[in-house]
Amino acid sequence: MATLEIRDLHVSVEAENGPREILKGVDLTVKQGETHAIMGPNGSGKSTLAYSLAGHPKYTVTSGSVLLDGEDVLEMSVDERAKAGVFLAMQYPVEVPGVSVSNFLRTAATAVRGEAPKLRLWVKEVKEAMAALQMDPAFAERNVNEGFSGGEKKRHEILQLELLKPKIAILDETDSGLDVDALRIVSEGINRVRSTGEVGTLLVTHYTRILRYIKPDYVHVFAAGRIVESGGAELADKLEEEGYESYVKGGASE
Amino acid sequence: MADTPLNAAVNTAGSTTAGSIEVGTAGAGAQLAGPGTGRTAVQQPIDARVAVKPSFDVNDFPVPNGREEDWRFTPLHRLGGLHDGTAAAIAERDGAGTDKVEFVLPDGVTAETVGRDDARLGKAGKPVDRVAAQAFSAFEQALVVTVPKDAVLPEPVRIDVRAEGGVRFAHVVIDVKPFAEAVVVLNHVGTGTRAANVELLVGDGAKLTFVSVQDWDRDAVHVSQHNALVGRDASFKSVVVTFGGDLVRLHPRVNYAGPGGEAELFGLYFADAGQHLEHRLIIDHDTPHCRSNVAYKGALQGQDAHAVWVGDVLIRAAALGTDTYELNRNLVLTDGARVDSIPNLEIETGEIVGAGHASATGRFDDEQLFYLQARGIPADEARRLVVRGFFAELLQQIGVAEVQDQLMEKIEAELEAAV
């Protein structure tokens, strides 16, 4: 059973006047089959947590540890983390000129699985996954994220989640910028992956809206670079009613 | 934002991308005029270039100083003296540098070495700048390749040139007679200082695909003007591929000898650190019902890799029913590279089918790299994926399988060597 263990994680970014600490001691354990929602106000550092776990070069881990089944994730390069089973669905996926979606997906699947998927099975797999996300087949021939609408970008991220089958899925504000229909389709995709019981999900979000579709096992409130409160799904209801004010007022948020 | 579209309309101002990519703006060659500028009239660059009086005689052109519209991007000091007579003097003093030339000639095709006075020379057009005129004034013997009337060649004509140093001026005529169909590959390797004129005569109803590969050693200097004269209802396809050399400056030009002609100009270049690769083309639509389509794509990597692309399309008043489009795309893989991309379209009649151009320079940046790596793709493979994808579409348009394969191999080799 895969387990991601984050212990006392401190992360800085380079700012104009030297390094600025954003994560100030994050502790969190995510097990396969569990869904954790990380909720917090803007600037609380929740996206930094997501990108640090994936290994974005902008972030420097100054102390703490991240282990995936006992393996040191922080020692791994970005692609090694992906191969180890860490997946980050990005809030703002970037355009990659000249690379078609189908080529990209197959290259990624080959890298993550360690061998090229058999072509016929692969074509079927992609087709079915795209149909489930209500994506036009012509989508596969477009360049990665080039000219995609906000909803298309998020569907494309979840398509990759379904195809790459990670152990730990980090979904960074996947709900942002989606209308109700797109949110439902994307959430259904995430739920399909969750229902396999083989993925631990870290759902990073500002709003409680997506939690109507995706029921978390745990909700963590993130403020000022650390988790300040943890609870069950009912904590999200409290946030829905009261907002983040009580956490921010205490000087918790920057 | 990685991709910065320069412009989609005629001579609109462009934009400059961030960081170290410098992008020339469309119409940037237009000089300011009026009080204080020392000039009294605004001159469009395309006018200036078309207005140049073509001539076979080098003495009809002043030595360029680098401020001229058509020389302003070229580092003259790296031309090996091709522009100021010193190269010609070296060739005179030491004798011309040697080229080893090998041919593959399908049945019926002839390749002749002829003297300067051969009547078949100079029919496709005259030199339009000093280096091309220098080449014409100084070459000793010309190569004339003839594809006979109605011949449909089963395989490409190959002309493999290996330059073995020194200075040499060349003249090549590819004469494809009416209704013949041919693919001609002119392949350049080795090193030296070379200037040439290549004449491409495409007879009425004929089809010619001309592939010029510049696979030079790193220190070669190569300047060449390609003059195509496209016959009535003829099809001409030019494929220019430039990888090697210290300075390569090619000037493909198209003129139409009769209505119904079609020209496609494809180009592919890969500039590494310090290389200057310049492609400037002119399509002169002065004949009704002709078509042209231009697509050039380049990748750049390394400090002071410099690509210049200037695409001039002129639709004259007589060229009713013209249909033209030109595109230039550049992919900058590292910091320190520079692209100047300048499409110019000048239209003197509204009675056309279509005319357009586009230019964009995109950058392969850290965010793209992170995105691909976050999906398990290692960094070097990520870069290869992007470059391959970038060129693949263009390669498919070449339409000659063995040439496509050869070029894909070259691209792979470039990526292996330098990424």
Image (tube, coloured by chain):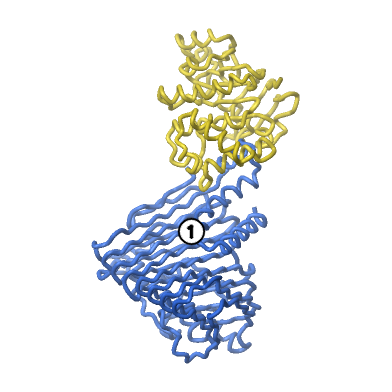
> Residue A170, image x and y in percent?
59, 25
Question: How many marks are shown on the rendered structure?
Answer: 1
At which x and y percent is residue A56?
Answer: 61, 35
Q: Tell me the quarter of the image containing the N terminus of chain A.
A: top right
| B249 sits left or right of B405 in the view | left
Q: Which residue is most to the right?
A: A70
Viewer-nearest residue: A218 or B46: A218
Chain B's colour? blue
Q: In this view, does B150 lie to the left or right of A83?
A: left
**Label 1 element class:** helix
Which residue appears at 32% of the width and 59% of the height? Answer: B355
Chain rendered yellow: A
Q: Residues within 10 Å of mark 1 (few under 14, many from 20)?
A: few
* Residue type at tag 1: Gln
Residue nearest the observer in this picture, A5 or B17 = A5
Residue at 46% x, 42% y is A146
Q: Is residue B303 left or right of residue B54?
A: right
Give how far across and how far down residue A41 sits, in percent.
Answer: 50, 19
Residue B92, located in which quarter of the rendered image? bottom right
Q: Position of residue B291 (x, y in %)?
A: 35, 65
- Tell me: residue A130, above or below residue B286: above
Using the rendered image of the protein, determine whether residue B131 is visible from the camera's viewpoint: no
Chain letter of mark 1 equals B
Specify whether residue B414 is in view: yes
Residue denoted by label 1: B397
Q: Residue at x 64, y 73 (%)?
A: B190
